[in-house]
Image (cartoon, rainbow, N blue to C red):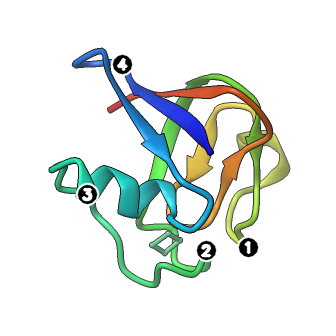
């Protein structure tokens, strides 16, 4: 598991191994936009403020990978991600 911090509220949500970031946010009561939920459509693109993402989508350009994450499929390499949510 790893954690995501929501910058705007300071809330920290734990993402278990068997849940996506998107699902964990929904479980915590946050409405999040999504469509394909398989890393191909781009709807769930979220700004990544800090932390190292384990990108598993098919959408992001190389130059976007440092500061964006597709939260339906991608995860953290370790520790905590800070999202602009
Ligand atoms: Fe389509 Fe995440 S919901 S890429």
**Disc 1 versus disc 4: distance between alpha carbons?**
26 Å
Q: Give yes or no for contact between labels 1 and 2 (Cβ–Cβ under 8 Å).
A: yes
Q: Give yes or no for contact between labels 3 and 4 (Cβ–Cβ under 8 Å).
A: no
- Name the mark on residue 58: 1
Disc 1 or disc 4, which is closer to the eye?
Answer: 4
Camera-side residue: 78 or 57? 78
Q: Element at badge 4?
A: loop
Q: Give yes or no for contact between labels 2 and 4 (Cβ–Cβ under 8 Å).
A: no
Q: Quadrant of the N terminus?
A: top right
Is residue 72 shown above or below 74?
A: below
Camera-side residue: 37 or 79? 79
Q: Give the residue number, with chain letter if any, for mark 3.
A: 27
Is residue 32 shown above or below 10?
A: below
Residue drawn at (38%, 55%), measured in percent from left and top? Answer: 24
Q: Position of residue 3 (x, y in %)?
A: 53, 33
Dot placed on the residue nearer the N-terminal end, 3 or 2 = 3
- Quarter where residue 55 is shown: bottom right
**Disc 1 versus disc 2: distance between alpha carbons?**
6 Å
Q: Element at badge 3?
A: helix
Dot placed on the residue nearer the N-terminal end, 2 or 4 = 4
Q: Position of residue 19 (x, y in %)?
A: 50, 65
Packing grade of label 3 (10 A; few <14, some 14-19, many >=20) is: few
Q: Give the residue number, with chain letter if any, for mark 2.
A: 39
- Quarter where residue 12 is shown: top left
Q: Element at badge 2?
A: loop
Residue drawn at (71%, 42%), measured in percent from left and top? Answer: 64
Dot placed on the residue nearer the N-terminal end, 3 or 1 = 3
Q: Give the residue number, with chain letter if any, for mark 4.
A: 7
Mark 2 Cβ inside 8 Å of ligand 1: yes
């Amino acid at each position: 598991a790893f954690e995501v911090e929501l910058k705007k509220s300071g809330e920290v949500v734990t993402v278990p191994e068997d849940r996506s970031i998107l699902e964990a946010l929904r479980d915590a009561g946050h409405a999040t936009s999504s469509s394909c939920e398989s890393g191909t459509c781009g709807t769930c693109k979220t700004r990544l403020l800090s932390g190292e993402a384990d990108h598993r989508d098919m959408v992001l350009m190389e130059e976007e990978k440092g500061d964006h994450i597709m939260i339906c499929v991608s995860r953290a390499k370790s520790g905590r991600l800070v999202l602009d949510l």
